[in-house]
Image: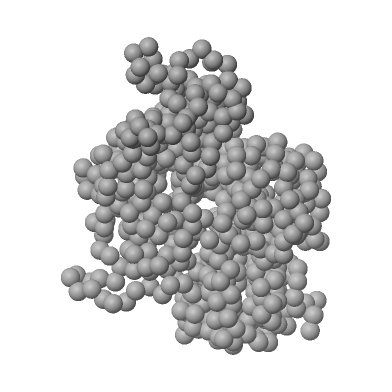
């Protein structure tokens, strides 16, 4: 039976697992202002006069339907970037269902372009569906999986049904009779969950496997690591072009590319198909040059922030001790809960705001590495958080003094200090009183929760990390408030003050500054994030544009000078016969010999007239690029 035979209400009466549907409620003006379904309507010959939804589970809590809701909205409403990503995510899941032989129907849920993917079941327990929901959410960031975790009230508008904006759900692929005649069993759902768990992206997305076949003959015009090259060479962007395209940008940002480099690569790289064409209901369609350039520039800025956050991470290693990973997940979950329920502890002072961000950075490093104890230099944490190194150092000391952190080891030579989050945030998972229960999370659930926590931390740390939100700009608290607008459609002065843990007067001042630079706008419910991201423009006006990049350069130079001096000290302490013959810094051609990873042969350190190390000159040499092998040295008059 084709979909043309069905009407919205006759289909609903066939597939609804219960005797009634949920319906919307009009306000006093006859409008439908909210997307909620507080009323019920019995299944009968009369169709409701307002939009309705069907429940996914029957009265006993057994799921009879699955609806995967891919939503392209953020706190400001419909986002073109997210809407295309939602369509790509839906297509990727549909491809997996096709491979497993699971019948399904794909609908455009409304005129805004969201996707609903429907599957009819013989009957499946709530626990099995919840496991599937977690696995699917770990793969597809635009999936709203709440309805799949709620057997009591979880539901969605069925195919063909009307939307409150006047549009209706439209079938894009599949036949509606597959929903009236279920063919999917619990074994099929278990197989789908296993497939999604196997394809889950790595905790560090840039190291994830390609989503499709790779063109072995393709090579980028600038070097990339192997995984980044594989993403660039993924034929037609793989099964999920928007995800693959962003992985290409992340790899390029990590390799030090510029916007001009990625714009050049986007013209030909198979994996960057998303920046040449867009996903429509009639297949992929070429973008205009202006649209392609705007989208690439917007996504490139986002990739740079993610790359800066992930720069201090070591190479990926599979966790060998799940009990340790469980403890890390529990501590991080408890930490985020404490931030939420006790905002005043972390927001009432500038020092507290910095401490909260540094704690988030260390929790992120622990989740990524799977280690309770992580090596983190003050400069690395400062760059991740968008703070100065002295501010980060004071925050680390204060957190250690108050018991939130433990210093496992001090910095030694070129090795960073090691830190460990304490486990005093809350009662650990699986304990009741003093009686521990040997009931650990299953590995798949643990990895999915880890992915969800990583996503939360990444969004919090990247949204507020910008030149504008440094201390010479609008301040770090302004960045945290701006990040809140990515999570909430609108905020009043009072609600924002409550979430930040500061006074309403202080919050009003920050909101005024954000409004002055047109970063937020008026909303019926208070204030909302502006449609356009004008942070770069505001940073140029304030005079702080490029501050974070300059900080990266300064910290790199400080590290090079320190490493150079440590090599000089080792040389001085060595026996005369064991000292290597080193060229003067002005010698050409200077060649660094990679004797081991992280090591190189340094030239002689500059000396003053008193034969002591001349650190100021060394810093100037590093800043001028004198230690680069191809540099043409002009300071030939310095003494050896």
Quarter residue 191 falls in? bottom right
- In the rendered image, which quarter contains the N terminus? bottom right
Q: Which residue sits at x=80%, y=80%?
A: 2
Q: 8 and 238: which one is in front?
A: 238
Furthest residue to the front? 577
Q: Position of residue 589 (x, y in %)?
A: 60, 28
Furthest residue to the left? 434
Q: Position of residue 415 (x, y in %)?
A: 36, 43
Q: Position of residue 129 (x, y in %)?
A: 51, 77
- In the rendered image, which quarter contains the C terminus? top left
Q: Which residue sits at x=60%, y=43%?
A: 255
Quarter residue 299 falls in? top right
Q: 146 and 385: which one is in front?
A: 385
Q: Would you say residue 387 is visible in this rendering?
A: no
Q: Which residue sits at x=52%, y=55%?
A: 204
In this picture, residue 100 sits left or right of residue 394: right
Q: Would you say residue 383 is visible in this rendering?
A: yes
């Amino acid at each position: 039976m084709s979909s043309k035979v069905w009407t919205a209400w006759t289909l609903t009466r066939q597939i609804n697992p219960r005797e009634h549907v949920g319906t919307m409620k009009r306000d006093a003006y006859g409008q439908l202002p909210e997307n909620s379904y507080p009323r019920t309507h019995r299944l009968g010959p009369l169709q409701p006069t307002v939009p309705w939804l069907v429940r996914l589970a029957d009265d006993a809590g057994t799921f009879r339907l699955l609806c995967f809701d891919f939503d392209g909205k953020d706190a400001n409403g419909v986002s073109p970037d997210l809407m295309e990503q939602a369509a790509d995510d839906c297509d990727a899941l549909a491809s997996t269902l096709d491979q497993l032989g699971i019948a399904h129907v794909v609908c455009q849920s409304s005129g805004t372009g969201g996707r609903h993917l429907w599957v009819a079941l013989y009957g499946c327990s709530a626990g099995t569906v919840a496991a599937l929901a977690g696995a699917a959410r770990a793969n597809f960031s635009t999936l709203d999986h709440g309805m799949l975790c709620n057997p009591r009230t979880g539901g969605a508008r069925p195919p063909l049904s009307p939307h409150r904006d006047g549009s209706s759900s439209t079938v894009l692929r599949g036949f509606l009779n597959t929903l009236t005649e279920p063919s999917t069993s619990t074994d099929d759902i278990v197989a789908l969950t296993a497939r999604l768990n196997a394809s889950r992206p790595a905790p560090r997305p840039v190291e994830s496997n390609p989503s499709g076949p790779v063109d072995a003959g393709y090579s980028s015009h600038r070097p990339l690591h192997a995984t980044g090259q594989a993403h660039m060479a993924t034929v037609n962007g793989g099964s999920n072009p928007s995800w693959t395209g962003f992985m290409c940008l992340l790899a390029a940002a990590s390799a030090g590319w510029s916007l001009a480099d990625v714009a050049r690569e986007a013209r030909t790289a198979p994996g960057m198909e998303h920046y040449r064409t867009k996903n429509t209901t009639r297949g992929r369609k070429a973008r205009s040059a202006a649209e392609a350039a705007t989208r690439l520039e917007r996504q490139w800025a986002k990739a740079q922030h993610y790359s800066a956050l992930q720069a201090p991470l070591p190479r990926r290693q599979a966790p060998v001790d799940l009990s340790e990973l469980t403890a890390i997940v529990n501590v991080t979950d408890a930490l985020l809960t404490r931030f939420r329920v006790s905002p005043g502890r972390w927001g009432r002072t500038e020092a507290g705001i910095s401490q909260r961000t540094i704690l988030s950075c260390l929790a992120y490093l622990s989740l990524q590495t799977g280690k309770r104890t992580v090596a983190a230099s003050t400069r690395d944490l400062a760059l991740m958080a968008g703070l100065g190194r002295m501010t980060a150092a004071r925050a680390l000391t204060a957190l250690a003094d108050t018991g939130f952190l433990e210093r496992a080891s001090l910095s030694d030579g070129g090795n960073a200090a090691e830190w460990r989050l304490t486990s005093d945030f809350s009662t650990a998972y699986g304990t009741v009183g003093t009686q521990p229960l040997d009931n650990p999370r299953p590995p798949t659930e643990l990895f999915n929760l880890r992915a969800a926590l990583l996503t939360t931390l990444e969004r919090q740390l990247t949204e507020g990390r910008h030149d504008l939100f440094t201390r010479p700009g609008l301040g770090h608290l302004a960045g945290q408030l701006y990040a809140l607008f990515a999570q909430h459609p609108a905020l009043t002065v009072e609600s924002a003050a409550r979430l930040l843990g500061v006074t309403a007067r202080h919050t009003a001042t920050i909101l005024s500054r954000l409004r002055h630079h047109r970063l937020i706008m008026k909303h019926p419910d208070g204030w909302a994030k502006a449609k356009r991201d004008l942070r770069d423009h505001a940073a140029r006006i304030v005079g702080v544009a490029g501050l974070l990049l300059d900080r990266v350069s300064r910290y790199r130079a400080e590290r090079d000078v320190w490493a150079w001096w440590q090599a000089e000290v080792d040389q001085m302490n060595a026996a005369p016969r064991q000292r290597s013959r080193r060229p003067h810094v002005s010698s050409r051609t200077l060649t660094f010999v990679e004797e081991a990873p992280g090591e190189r042969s340094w030239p002689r350190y500059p000396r003053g007239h008193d034969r002591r190390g001349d650190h100021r000159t060394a810093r100037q040499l590093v800043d001028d690029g004198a230690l680069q092998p191809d540099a043409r040295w002009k300071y030939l008059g310095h003494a050896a």
